[in-house]
Amino acid sequence: MHRRRLSGLLLGIGTVGLAVVLSLNLYTALNAQSLNGLPWYSSEWWTRWFPSYLSWISLVAIGLLLRFLPSSRQAR
């Protein structure tokens, strides 16, 4: 029960965080006057955006693993 709740929590937080980062990245990429606007996949882009994507994707991946991997407990 706790594992399922933790999985749902991680999936929810990771999905919302990933959506926010994606929308911010798209906004700054499309807004030419933005100070944070960077060419996609340039070295500055990797420095600024990749760590954020990596952290949110890892939360989603851990949530999916907890949800779909079998439990280590054996049924009695």
Image (spheres, grey):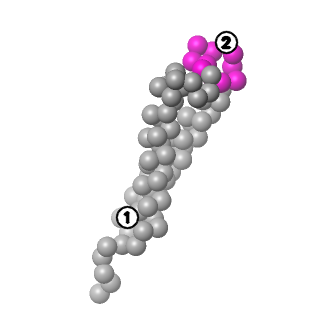
**What residue is disc 2 on?**
33
- Which numbered disc flags the more N-terminal residue, 1 or 2? 1
| Residue at image location 46% in from the left, 53% down from the top | 61
Q: Secondary structure at mark 1?
A: helix
74 over 60 or under it: above or below: below
**Crowdedness of circle 1 by 10 Å Cα count: few (<14), some, many (20+)?**
few
What label does residue 3 carry, if any? Answer: 1
**Rendered image quadrant of residue 30:** top right
Q: Is residue 72 visible?
A: yes
Q: CA distance from mark 1 to mark 2?
A: 45 Å
Can residue 16 be found in the magenta stretch?
no
How many labels sit on residues? 2
* Relative image position of residue 20 (x, y in whole percent): 57, 36
* Residue 37 inside the magenta-drawn segment: yes
Q: Which residues are magenta?
A: 28-38
Q: In this rendering, does residue 5 appear at all?
A: no
